[in-house]
Image: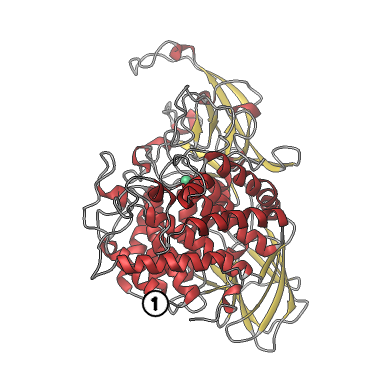
């Protein structure tokens, strides 16, 4: 067993002893965020969302389900079979927050939850409130759809968080007893099978990392090896790809099926590679990554084009209005790309983390921290009959005026909470040679390099609104070391200076600018990333966005909301002039403060089309353009006033393409 005191140091992923990790994750206390964009988000998360989460988990019956399982109350189980997992994700978020700063009330809530879990756990270690309260209360009766191992995985991750953030082993003891029980049931000479919803794989690898218990790693590998047998077909009419059982993991060539399941599985597979170095696993993951980023990824980092099966679509099937883009899929992509980054040391994975984080993930919670999108469409026509969740209220047509508070299937809200709470973990890594900065936020970073040298530096920036990043060395050892800074994919011609002197020759390695020298305390490194707002075009094979442009500034993707437009028209009639310059202004009063982008454009009045859907292409068409300045806001902030028309992709002015374009 590792020394547990050692384990106090890490965040959600610990690659310190992973033999195949290119980069090592930082101590939890190595990176402390200073006032800026993310501390604001974290404050709302800590002070509002976590309390609100507890209230919602209470209201939805999650805690009562555990009480019923423990025999302390008599009632019927409520909700989906995986409700325990929402508690575990919430607990994980609470742990990361309490590790930063105590909060008596939050601690009491967490204590209450942990006591319930402990009380519900069977003497043999098993725990799942759904199974324990049904008749018969036998475990593992429906591996395809039962989510028992999925829930176990989330329990393990919460347990790791409590141990690492606070040295609190109560949950870890519960988790290990459960994991040991699972080890006694499943394995090559025991029961075969895997969970229909991957998740436990990455959790078992982390449990291995924190305890040093090799059986957990072996079990993770066993579950990964169980896939691709085409035997999981038990859910509605979906094929085995829904459960990630359509192809053996090492033969994966493309993303298919339920997007969250696909990406959680990929996270587990990558974690396994980090420990075993089996080349076939990495090659499969690289194939999967290529397929996703080249044919199945939304500009917002969203994944999953289809409501049906919450699934990936065909290549280039990326509709903007009927897309799924579940918040959890973007979170899973963020988690997977983090593991790929730790594996390969390639900035393109951090680019994908950033795309998902600043657009899809950030779009889920309302600015008030108490409402959440489950699904994240890139276009809304009239805000009617749209499903914002996988669930529909039974009684009435759902015409929302804001994000729903919670969901019957509430996987997304606590998932957002745990990512926000642990954001500092993803900022930087280290290796023998130096440290690598992957994401930009005001922060103090202090760490010992793996060579033993102590380093302290301070990062100052107004990212993501401004592209200037100033780093000051506070403490450095006697030897030279490398400071690697990610140059984001959207950034061109970055300017770097050291102590005021522009550096013209520098090393660029796999998306990182590498500066090596014998740093002195007081050295100042400034990186200037140009944050000019720009138009983005899409691959013409994406028919939904052909002939359209989107606006991006830095990592932020923009959208139009109808309420911001001077001309009160329908956003279906709007066109944008991509040849005119974009202008940018800061609006501190709008949506908690956002950078607004304006573009030249027009609304088209077309009498000729008013009463027709179709007419001969030779018919004369009378169209009257009404020029205007189109006002765009960050996509993540949409829907925080009254939800109305919105679109990310806007048709280019027709004269620019020589013909009238399809809308949408
Ligand atoms: Zn979700």
Residue placed furthest toward the right = 522
x, y percentage for residue 397? 47, 22
Q: Could you tell me which secondary element the residue under label 1 belongs to?
A: helix
210 to the left or right of 179: right
Residue placed furthest toward the left = 230
Residue at 48%, 50% in the rendered image: 71
Is residue 371 depicted above or below 572 in this figure?
Answer: below
x, y percentage for residue 64? 52, 45
Whether residue 186 is visible, yes or no, is yes
In terms of depth relative to the viewer, which is nearer, 284 or 209? 209
Residue at 45%, 12% in the rendered image: 608
x, y percentage for residue 159? 53, 64
Q: Which residue is mark 1?
A: 214
Residue 495 location, quadrant: bottom right
Q: How many marks?
A: 1
Residue 200 location, quadrant: bottom left
x, y percentage for residue 604? 53, 21
Q: Which quadrant holds the C terminus?
A: top left
Q: Which scheme is used to colour this image of the protein? A: secondary structure
Residue at 48%, 70% in the rendered image: 342
Residue at 35%, 55% in the rendered image: 291
Residue placed furthest toward the bottom = 478
**Disc 1 Cβ-to-ligand 1 distance below 8 Å:** no
In terms of depth relative to the viewer, which is nearer, 557 or 285? 285
Residue 586 location, quadrant: top right
325 to the left or right of 401: left
Is residue 133 depicted above or below 175 in this figure?
Answer: above
In terms of depth relative to the viewer, which is nearer, 69 or 58? 69
């Amino acid at each position: 067993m590792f020394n547990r005191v050692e384990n106090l140091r890490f965040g959600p992923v610990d690659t310190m002893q992973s033999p195949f990790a290119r980069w090592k994750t930082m101590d939890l206390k190595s990176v402390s965020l200073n006032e800026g964009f993310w501390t604001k988000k974290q404050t709302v998360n800590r002070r509002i969302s976590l309390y609100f989460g507890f209230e919602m988990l209470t209201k939805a019956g999650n805690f009562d389900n555990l009480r019923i399982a423990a025999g302390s109350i008599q009632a019927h189980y409520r909700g989906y079979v995986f409700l325990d997992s929402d508690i575990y994700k919430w607990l994980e978020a609470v742990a990361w927050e309490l590790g930063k700063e105590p909060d008596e009330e939050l601690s009491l809530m967490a204590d209450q939850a942990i006591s319930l879990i402990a009380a519900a756990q069977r003497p043999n270690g098993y725990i799942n409130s759904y199974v324990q309260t049904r008749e018969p209360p036998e475990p593992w009766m429906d591996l395809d759809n039962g989510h028992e191992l999925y829930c176990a995985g989330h329990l393990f991750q919460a347990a790791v968080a409590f141990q690492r953030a606070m040295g609190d082993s109560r949950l870890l003891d519960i988790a290990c007893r459960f994991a040991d029980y699972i080890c006694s049931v499943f394995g090559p000479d025991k029961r075969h099978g895997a969970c229909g919803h991957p998740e436990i794989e990455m959790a078992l690898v982390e449990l291995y990392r924190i305890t040093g218990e090799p059986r957990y790693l072996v079990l993770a590998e066993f579950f990964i090896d169980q896939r691709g047998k085409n035997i999981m077909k038990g859910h509605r009419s979906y094929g085995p790809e829904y459960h990630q059982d359509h192809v053996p993991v090492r033969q994966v060539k493309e993303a298919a099926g339920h997007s969250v399941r696909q990406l959680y599985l990929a996270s587990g597979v990558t974690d396994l590679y980090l420990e075993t170095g089996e080349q076939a696993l990495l090659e499969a993951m690289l194939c999967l990554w290529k397929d996703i980023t080249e044919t199945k990824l939304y500009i917002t980092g969203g994944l999953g084009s289809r409501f049906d099966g919450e699934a990936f679509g065909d290549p280039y099937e990326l509709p903007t209005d009927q897309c799924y883009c579940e918040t959890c899929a973007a979170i899973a992509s963020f988690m997977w790309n983090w593991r790929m980054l730790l594996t390969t040391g390639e900035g393109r994975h951090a680019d994908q983390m950033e795309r998902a984080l600043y657009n899809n993930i950030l779009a889920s919670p309302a600015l008030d921290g108490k409402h959440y999108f489950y699904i994240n469409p890139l276009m809304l026509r009239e805000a009617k009959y749209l499903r914002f969740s996988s669930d529909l209220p039974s009684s009435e047509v759902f015409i929302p005026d804001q994000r729903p508070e919670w969901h019957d299937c509430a996987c997304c809200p606590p998932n957002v909470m745990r990512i926000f709470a642990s954001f500092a973990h993803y900022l930087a890594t280290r290796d023998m040679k130096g440290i690598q900065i992957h994401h930009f936020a005001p922060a103090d970073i202090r760490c010992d390099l793996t060579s033993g040298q102590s380093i302290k530096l301070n990062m100052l920036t107004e990212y993501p609104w401004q592209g200037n990043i100033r780093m000051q060395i506070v403490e450095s050892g006697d030897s030279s070391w490398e400071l690697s800074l990610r140059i984001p994919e959207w950034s061109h011609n970055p300017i770097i200076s050291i102590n005021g002197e522009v550096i013209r020759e520098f090393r660029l390695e796999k998306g990182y600018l590498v500066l090596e020298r014998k740093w002195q305390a007081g050295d100042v490194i400034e990186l200037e990333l140009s944050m000019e707002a720009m138009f983005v075009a899409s691959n013409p094979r994406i028919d939904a966005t052909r002939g359209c442009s989107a606006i991006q500034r830095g990592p932020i993707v923009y959208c139009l909301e109808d309420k911001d437009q001077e001309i009160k028209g329908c956003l279906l009639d709007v066109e944008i002039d991509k040849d005119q310059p974009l202008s940018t202004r800061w609006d501190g009063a709008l949506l908690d403060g956002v950078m607004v982008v304006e573009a030249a454009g027009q609304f088209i009045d077309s009498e000729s089309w008013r009463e027709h859907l179709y007419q001969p292409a030779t018919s004369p068409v009378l169209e009257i353009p009404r020029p205007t300045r189109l006002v765009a806001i960050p996509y993540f902030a949409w829907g925080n006033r009254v939800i109305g028309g919105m679109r990310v992709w806007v048709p280019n002015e027709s004269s620019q393409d020589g013909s009238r374009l399809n809308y949408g």
